[in-house]
Structures are given as structure tokens and as C-alpha cells.
Amino acid sequence: MRTILSALLLGYSGIMAPGEEVPPLPDRDEGYQHVERFIKIMEEVRTRHPDADKVSYERLVNHALEGMFASLDTFSTFYHPETVQHLDFSNPEIEEQFTLPSLGISLAERDDTVYLASVREHSPASRVGLRVGDVIQQANKEDLSPLDLPAVYTALQGQAGESLALTIYRKSARRTLTVDLLHAVIKQEALPEAFFLEQYDAPKVAYARLSEFTATAARELEVALDDLEDKGLTSLILDLRGNPGGLLRVSVDLLGLFLPPNTEVVTTQGRAPDARQPALRTAERQRVERKYPIVVLLDRNSASASELVAGALQDLKRATVIGETSFGKGSVQNIERRTGGTAVRLTFATYHTPSGKTPHEIGITPDIQVEINDEDLANFERFKVRSSAPPETQAMLDKWTDPVLKAALTHLKSL
């Protein structure tokens, strides 16, 4: 038994590169007794449980590992052999693996449920009223609730023109909905709109809404700002509500539009040597110096790169953040194959804004907090697709006052 325990405890050292060390934990001498306890309980289960098909070593160990990873944090995951076949190990952007452009949604997993992390505008999902946070339950009457993220992602895939009956649970309304979607070819702009808020008696206040941090996002915003600045822009409201994030390098490029050259904006921190990466900085040259006031809008669905941008601008006193506390995705994962056809996605570091704070599982706290109810969230989704909305939706929006945008304009007028 002692030999087996030694092999188990020492086997992990092969994962680290030679010469690399991780600071020891205070309970390092307790490993043998706890692993021995695990093995004894596993052997008891194998001896006494009546269903022999459920007590193979492979099954018991894999499920034990699944529980261990689930206990760590929201984004660490153990993948069973059945789901590993769906993963692209060459893709460094883990979140991008679970985007379904033909439906206009991206998926994420939290608290053992798979939910909509984003809903793209003018997409099949937005047209039937799906919202960020809706929990996936069924697809074409097949129960998906026991499945993990990669398996649900696979079940929802389809070709353009194929139909999908999707059943979701909406926590805010405490009800289950079934909608019919049609897979389609979707084109999404990172910056759907940028204009002056003349209708709010703010003819020189620019409003720019960024839907996600795709490869072109920083460039699209730069082009829009050039045009608005030529027309007399005096201040900017950057709306990142509902923005699920995207490419880290693009968020750094975007920060370079507003911060001095070579400014340190993002660092990573962790115990392992591979977590100690050089700080990410804005470009060494800045084409245009922008000194006007900036307000960044956030809500509970603003995540990842959105949080890093808002947090950096907030820390460096370059922008005022208004809205709700954001989602809280500020961690770094890598995904690697393991023996037995399994794989793991392990959080090994956290992202930090210039002040040293991380949004991981905390979110970015706004400078000015605004209460946003479910009706406000629904109306904001309607606002994003207002150009193609029916008359009754337009009438509804005419009666609605966006509380976050109102707070932003009030703040800018006070400067």
C-alpha cells in the first residue's frame, strides 16, 4: 500500500518542468494518510456496492476526480473520455470552443448547469427571446441537464437550415420555456453602434456599445472614435453590458486607445512557475491622445475581457465605472490531456488589474452602482435589436428609461 501511495503522491511531479518548484503547502506531510483513506473507502465501495457495473477502478477514480475539480472553482473541469473527443486542444481560447455562431449563443458552465453566456444580436436566439443566464435543459426533447458543457455544446450543433426545439429554465422568472430555433449563418459586429446621444440632450456625448472582444473590436472602436472626434466628441460612454469578453490581446489593444504608451494593464498571479508571466502593456506608441472623460457601463453579464478593461480604466483613474458588479471571470486556465483518455482544465492563475485586484469570482465593483431589475435587462436586450423590432416593442422602449445610461449622463453633466 505504501508503494502505491508513494507513486500516487510523487506522480504529479512529472507534470512540472525540471528545476521548477511550487511553494509547498502546510499540509504536505499529510498526503499519505488522506490518499490512504481514499483508497480504503474506494475498496470498500468495490467490495460492498451491489452494482458491479458501477465500481470499476476507472469509473470510480474518474468520478472522484470530477468532484475534486468541481470543488476548486467555477472554471476548473475534469473531462471524461466521452467528452474529450469534442475538445480542440490546439485552441488556446477555451471560451471560444463553446460558441455556436449558427444560433448566436455561447455556452458556459456554473454550479453544474450549462447556461447561455451570451446571446448575439439579430441571431436566431435573440429573435425568440433567449437571454443571458437561461439554463439549458432539453434539445429536441432530449434531456441535456445531466450533461457537462462539451456534451451540451455537441448536442446543440447543427447546419444552417436545421431546426432545434430548445427548452430552457429562466431563473429570474422561475419558469421553463421551449423555443424553436433555426440554425443560420450569422455575421456579428464587435461594435454594433456608436453615435451621439442627441435624443438625451447630450449632442457631443458619444455612446459606443461593444458586444464582444473579437479580433477586430479595438480597430472598429478606433475608427468610430476617429469619426466622432472629428465631429466634436467631448466625452464617451463605453457600454460593456452583456459583453462576455473574448480575446485578451484585443482588450489590451483597446486599453491602448485611452491610456499612455507602455502602460502596465494586466498581470497574472499564481503559485506555479507557469503563472508568472510578464505584465501585459499597451503599445509603445499611441497614434492619438484621448483625454476626454470616459464612463464604462457594466452589468452582471459583463465578463472576462470586459472586466479587465473596466478594471484597468478604473484603477488608473481614466474612467468612471457605472452599473452592476460584473460577472467575475478573471482566471487563467490551461487544458491538457491525461491518461485514460481524460483531460483536465485547471485554473492555474488569476488576472489582475493595475491595482493588483482580480475580478475572479468577485467581479468589478462600479464607482456608481445602479440597481438593474429583470425588466431593465429585458428592455436592454430589446434596445439592442430595436432597428428590427415590431411596433409594439418600439412603443415599449419609448416608455422605458435606461437607468444605467441615465446615471452615466448625470455623472458626465456633473463634471
Image (cartoon, rainbow, N blue to C red):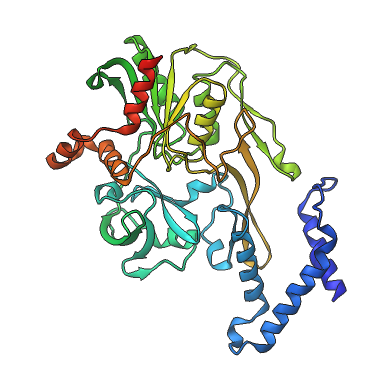
Residue 233 x %, y %: 35, 13
In the rendered structure, the answer to whether residue 385 lies left or right of residue 38 reads: left
Total marks in image: 0
Displayed quadrant of residue 204 = top left
Q: Quadrant of the C terminus?
A: top left
Residue 37 x %, y %: 76, 74
Residue 361 x %, y %: 55, 46
Q: Residue at x 42, y 66 (%)?
A: 145
Q: Residue at x 51, y 36 (%)?
A: 364
Q: Is residue 3 above or below residue 25?
A: below
Q: Is residue 162 above or below residue 225?
A: below
Q: Residue at x 74, y 45 (%)?
A: 272
Residue 234 or residue 52, whichever sits in front: 234
Displayed quadrant of residue 236 = top left
Q: Is residue 64 above or below residue 27?
A: below
In the rendered structure, the answer to whether residue 370 lies left or right of residue 354 reads: left
Displayed quadrant of residue 174 = bottom left
Residue 267 or residue 322, whichever sits in front: 322
In the rendered structure, the answer to whether residue 388 lies left or right of residue 91 reads: left
Q: Is residue 29 above or below residue 215?
A: below
Q: Quadrant of the N terminus?
A: bottom right
In the rendered structure, the answer to whether residue 22 lies left or right of residue 110 reads: right
Hey, which residue is sitting farthest left in the picture? Answer: 391
Residue 311 x %, y %: 53, 31
